[in-house]
Image (cartoon, helix red, strand yellow):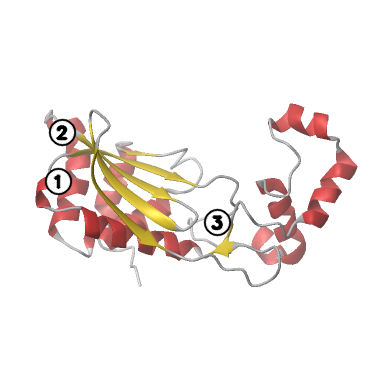
Amino acid sequence: EVRAGRGGGLADELLSERRVCGANIVENGIAPAVRTMCSGMLEGGGAVRRALQNVVNAGREGTMRDCIWTLDAGTTGMKCTLFDKAGRALKAAVAEYDVEMPFPGWAQQPAPWFTAAAIEGVHAMLDEESAARVAVIGLSGTMNGCIPLDASGEALYPNIIHSDTRAEAQLELIHTVMDERAFYRHTGNRLDVHYTLPKILWLREHHPEVYG
C-alpha cells in the first residue's frame, strides 16, 4: 500500500515549481495522484529521493542537468525511461499490469495499478549516478480513458480505457441530441463509443453516486 504522507512536501515543491511536466497536471486535479506516486517512490530511498530533489533544485541552484525522466502509462504497462538531452534513451524499465474484462465489451484498470507500476519501474531504472542527472520529469498516458476523481484527487472508479465499448446505449443518446457534424464542430472529435463522453454518461446512469 502506498501512503501519501512521506515525501508529500517534496511532491508539492515539484508541482509548485512545475518541474513535473504533463497535460494540465494541477488544473485537472492530477496533483494528488502525483503526490501519492512521488511519496511511494521515496519509500525506496536514496536514488529516487535524490532524483526528485534534483528536479526541485534544478531551477534554483543553476546547476545544469542533462536528463529527462519519463513515465508513460500504456495499455499493458508503465514505461519508465531516462533520456539525455539529445533524445537518446539511456535506461528503461517496464512494469506490466493487466486489463480487467469482467463483461463483454468492458476494459478497465484500477487507478492504483498505475501508481504501483510507476514506483516499481522507477526503482528498477534509477540508480544514484543517473538520478543525479535528472532535470525534469515527463508524464504521459493513453487517450480516451475515463477516471472519475473526488475533490481530493482520489479515483472513484477504475479507468474505463480506450478499448471499452460498454457505452453503446449512451452513444445513441448523444445521437438523438446532435448529429456527427455538429458534434465534431463543438468538440473536434467523432461520435464514437471509445471516446470519453459516452463513458461519463454511462457512469451517470449506472453509478450516480460516482457521477454526483
Looking at numbered disc 2 in the image, what kind of residue is underneath it?
Arg
Q: Dot 2: what SS?
A: loop
Q: Amino acid at mark 1?
A: Ser
Tell me which amino acid carries mark 3: Leu
Q: How many marks?
A: 3
- Position in image of residue 31 (x %, y %): 41, 49
Tell me the residue that label 2 is attached to: 65
Q: Which residue is under mark 1? A: 130
- Residue 67, horizontal then vertical, whole percent: 21, 36
- Residue 65 on image: x %, y %: 15, 33
Q: Split into 4 quadrants, where in the image is the C terminus?
A: bottom right
Viewer-closest of 1 and 99: 99
Crowd tier of the residue under label 1, counting other residues whose Cα lies within 10 Å: few below 14, some 14–19, many 20 or above: some
Tag 3 or tag 1, which sits nearer the N-term?
Answer: 1
Residue found at x 39% / y 55%: 78
As helix, strand or loop, the secondary structure at mark 3 comes to loop
Frontmost of labels 2 and 1 is 1
Give the structural element (helix, strand or loop) at label 1: helix
Disc marking residue 149: 3
Graded by Cα atoms within 10 Å as few (under 14), some (14 to 19) or many (20 or more), the crowding at tag 2 reads some
Which residue is nearer to you in this view: 186 or 81?
81
Give the Cα separation between the discs numbered 2 and 3. 35 Å
**Distance between mark 2 and mark 1 Cα atoms:** 10 Å
